Amino acid sequence: MIWDIGLSRPGEMNTIGDRAWFDASRDGIQDTNEAGVADITVSLYDAATNLQRTTLTDVEGYYYFSGLAPGSYLLHFSKPAD
């Protein structure tokens, strides 16, 4: 899955981040009882689809990319092997 995340605050560095979770109810809504998923690879691409950075979600499913220049970015999430 790829998400287009546009940032547009001139002169400011930005952060993109959130939480990946197991959607047990399959409704696309993060419910309080749905656990985060660790070790998902999250790749950050610029608007021209050039890979900028990658990270793994932590044990709670959180990921962050900070110090980003204003612009449009794409995120790609890769499921863990298991």
Image (cartoon, helix red, strand yellow):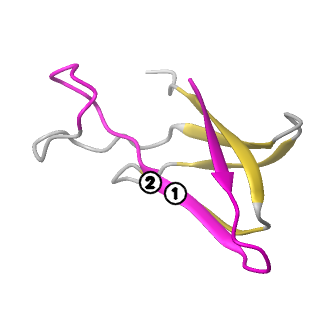
Residue 17 image point, x, y percent: 52, 57
16 with respect to 49 (left or right):
left
Residue 11: x and y in percent read 79, 80
- The residue closer to the viewer here, 4 or 79, is 4
Q: 4 or 26, which lies in front?
A: 4
Q: Quadrant of the C terminus?
A: top left
Is residue 3 visible in the rendered structure shown here?
A: yes
Q: Amino acid at mark 2?
A: Asp
Is 28 magenta? The answer is yes
> Disc 1 marks which residue?
17
Which residues, given as a range, are shown in magenta? 1-29
Q: Which residue is depicted at the point 28% across and 31% down? A: 22
The answer to whether the residue labelled 1 contacts the one labelled 2, judged by CB atoms less than 8 Å apart, is yes
Residue type at mark 1 is Gly
Q: Is residue 20 magenta?
A: yes
Taking the image as shown, residue 69 lies to the left or right of residue 40, namely right
Residue drawn at 12 percent across, 47 percent down = 32
Identify the residue at image location x=22%, y=19%. 26
Q: Quadrant of residue 24?
A: top left
Q: Secondary structure at mark 1?
A: strand
- Front residue of this view, candidates 9 and 22: 9
| Residue 7: quadrant of the picture | bottom right
**Tag 2 residue:** 18
